[in-house]
Image (tube, rainbow, N blue to C red):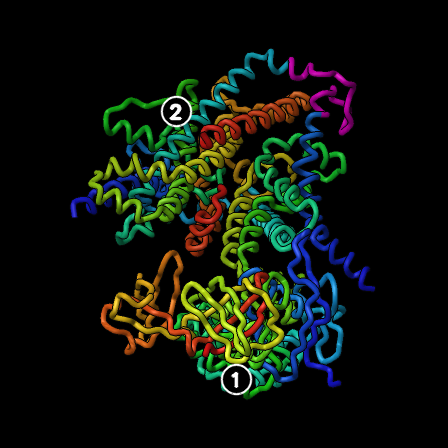
Amino acid sequence: MIEPALRFAGVGKSYGEARILDDLHLEVAEGEFFVLLGPSGCGKTTLLRMTAGLQTLDRGEIYLRGTALSPVPPEGRNIAMVFQDYALYPHMTVYQNMAFGLRRHARRRAETDAQVRKTAALLGIGALLERRPHQLSGGQQQRVALGRAIVRDPALYLMDEPLSNLDAQVRATVRTEIKELQRRLRVTTLYVTHDQVEAMTLADRMAVLNEGRVQQIGRPIDVYRAPANEFVAQFLASPKLNVFDGTLERAAGTASVRTAIGTFAFPNPPSSLGEPTALRVGLRPEEIKVSFPIDESEPHLSVRLIEPLGSQVLVIAERDGTQVTVSVAADALPAEPRRLRVVPAGCAVHLFDRGGLALAHFISA
Amino acid sequence: MRLQSDRLAAARPYLYLTPTLLVLATFTYLPIARLAEMSLHAPGTGASLGPWIGLSAYQKLFSNPLFWRILGQTFAYVFASVPIAMALGLGLALLLDQPLRGLGLLRALYYAPVVMPTVAVAALALWMFNPNGGLVDYLLHLVGIAPIPWLVDTTWALPTLIVIAVWKNVGYYMVIYLAGLQALPQAVLDAARLDGARPLVRFFTITLPLLRPTTFFIGVVALIGSFQVFDFVNLMTQGGPSNATNVLVYFAYQNGFAYMQLGLAAALSLVMFALVLAILGLVAWTFNR
Amino acid sequence: MMRRFATYAVLVAGLFPLLLPFYWMAVTSLKAKRDVFTATPQWLPLHPAWDNYPLAWSAEPFGRFFFNSIVVTTLIVASQLVLASLAAFALARFEFRGRRAIFWLVVAALIVPVQITFVANFMTLARFGLLNSYLALVAPYAASAFGTFLLRQAFAAVPRQLEDAARLDGCSGLAFLWHVLLPLSRPTLIAFALVAVVAHWNDYFWPLIVTNNNAVRTLPIGLGMFVGQEVTTDWNLLMAASIFVSAPMLLLFFLMQRYFVRARLHTGIRG
């Protein structure tokens, strides 16, 4: 077996009684862009800081290219980190910021100079080298922070929500840049975020974390299509996952789930499903098919609110205390819709047991 | 190996603190205990202590009418000079807190006396208030006021010292008040303006209450500072005429170094310390109510 | 318009009592002895007696006092900066047992001025035969509770991420203090240093207690002796001496005004 670039073996961390991380196992391949996704307080930043050596671990070990990291001090780990607030040295120029670590690691002046200039050119900040951080825009500061990591030519990049302080516009640009850069440099990257869009767009593979435990590991698209549990499905939904109580009904060769908004039919019910009668049904707003009936006699929900997002429109509808949020293409929306009906055929349905564990994912027939 | 370096790392903050704590212990904390010790013993030969005498130094001090007079004079000095200088400082700060040309220079000029050595100020004041050719008397003469025996009269001497102290310190209070004013939330002042409050009303209902923390800070610093008044007394009046300007620190200095009553001086120092603590407590209590 | 005029009028009127003494000090210092006492004061030195300055300078060993003041002030301020930086570093950036208690211990020292402890400190120094030495002048001020407090506040304001970044760059411990904390706290450092320079250059009380020998006396003591001797006679010389004793601080103040004002803004102790 080839040793992965980065391996977390049973890593645990507690603060007093609170378990921040619990028996965590992860492997990141060489050159992989790996994203840790989770809500704040899930332990993802702690994991990053432990990898950097800024915090100690209570249990387990982290291996970088097969070497146990615990005995190695932060500066000896050959790891570079990009911080949420960039953490640029305010009293140093861009050049000095980038050169500082190299000089502390006893590189020669000429070598340092060449490295800094090469990296600055790569990031397109060559003209800013003599500026100080406060003279730079947020996006430029972010690039310098990246530069400071890249210039060290480390075995691993750690990125702690590096985009969260940028304006929406700049964020998208820098996101693309980070992705391109990582593709080009092929340096193993561990990236922490709470933003599912960042995770989906950047990650080769990702791990969803909650309350110190790994919920699911996989390629973004796989995690999206088949979330391992209700938490993951909820976290990857935008703006939110519609969840309904449902009852499973089996007939010869088919099965269906009845909910307050409609009955969804399994095309090929897996045998693994067993016979749970009561379960939870999740539908993402963008995965629900709807129609807007004019006729009042058809069963329907009443439209409560319309939130235009541009090309998409969120429609919130309700009946008897059951609310559903759906995302509809703007040009498919009639003027002033009053009634909404869920069309089961074609909806993507996620079934969970009462404990939230995923049972099946299917497209309703 | 690992353990050893861990232990070393744990010791580092204490290592960094040691020099500072050593100096503070030697010259600030322990002297308080040493003063107590000295005040309870008769003076010995050289640096050693004589026999235990209990509280008799304090008894001697408290039964001395001069002590009570000096205590009163110190309070008079403190509670006249501090409020006057603070009020003037606030007034200047209000005037200077405006976007007008040349105010930076004025600010600097008003501050200049603060950086002057007290000795130079004392020399200058002795000359200005001199009964023989002093400029102050001459200026009063111009407006028809007879010469005043500033520093040589028991009634006038203490007020004269107060005037000099105010002149020296007002710039200091001004600058801190300026900082306080500039930190005020502009939106609140604007709101009061829109509510139609006149400038004077705005000052008393908005500005002054918002400046409370600044006033508290200045009050504490000024009280501690002016309680220690010594330089002007020693240089200009030596506590005279007939003890009219004698103050606690000067009295302790006299006892310790002129009359060689070290026990008494130590007792006096501790009484001062207690007074400083009491006044601080009182000020803190007033402001936290 | 009217308000602006009124503001200027009041402020300029206020300048009169403020600046007149300075002016009078300067004018007197340049008067010949016979021009000092006149029935109507001479507002201008008609025959500037520049000689007053060298005369005053040699009336006491002011050269020696000047030298002593420079040595003592430099030693005190340098020591305070070093010790306060280290102590503040510990208090601001380390977790350790007793941190809060030590912090409050340092703050408490602020309310115990030398005017309270001088009798005890004099005895201590006397016992070790240290009176009349630079050590006696410097040692009680070698550390500064105020400087420690100020720098602690400045150091504590530096974000933790910066410390993390520095550690990954191989810069921790004293290197972090030197390369990051101190440069970042430059305004506070300068402000504190200036306040300390002024306070100890001008200090009259403590040198008075521990010196009685011209070899170690400082400028304020020298001028104080001059005040004692020259009262009622040579006001011109005394004013000249007052000017050259004050000049370094006034000069420093007008050159570094920006930092002085900042010192007051952030701190506020008397200089």
Q: Chain of mark 1?
A: A
What residue type is disc 2 on?
A: Trp
Which residue is depicted at the point 55% across and 12% down? B65
Observer-nearest of C265 and C203: C265
> Which residue ends up furthest to the right in the rendered image?
B1
Q: Chain of mark 2?
A: B
**Badge nearest the viewer, 2 or 1:** 1
* Residue under the image location 31 percent in, 42 percent down: B94
Left or right of C45 on screen, residue A57:
right
At 49% from the left and 64% from the top, the residue drawn is A246
Which of B232 and A32 lies nearest the eye of the viewer? A32
Residue topped by disc 1 = A181
Q: Which residue is mark 2?
A: B150
C248 within the magenta span: no
Residue kind at label 1, given as amino acid type: Leu
Circles 2 and 1 on the same subunit: no
- Kindly state the secondary structure of the residue where label 1 is placed: helix
Residue A162, position in %: x, y? 51, 71
Does residue B57 show up magenta in the picture? yes
Identity of the residue drawn at 66% across and 66% down: A50
Task: Look at the image and tell me whether residue B268 can be seen.
Answer: yes
Point out residue B102 in the picture as x, y percentages from the top left corner: 29, 53
Residue C200 found in image quarter: top right
- As drawn, the residue found furthest toward the bottom would be A184
Q: Position of residue A61 (x, y in %)?
A: 74, 69
Q: From what the image shows, is residue A213 above or below residue A94? A: above
Disc 2 crowd, CA 10 A, few/some/many (<14, 14-19, 20+): many
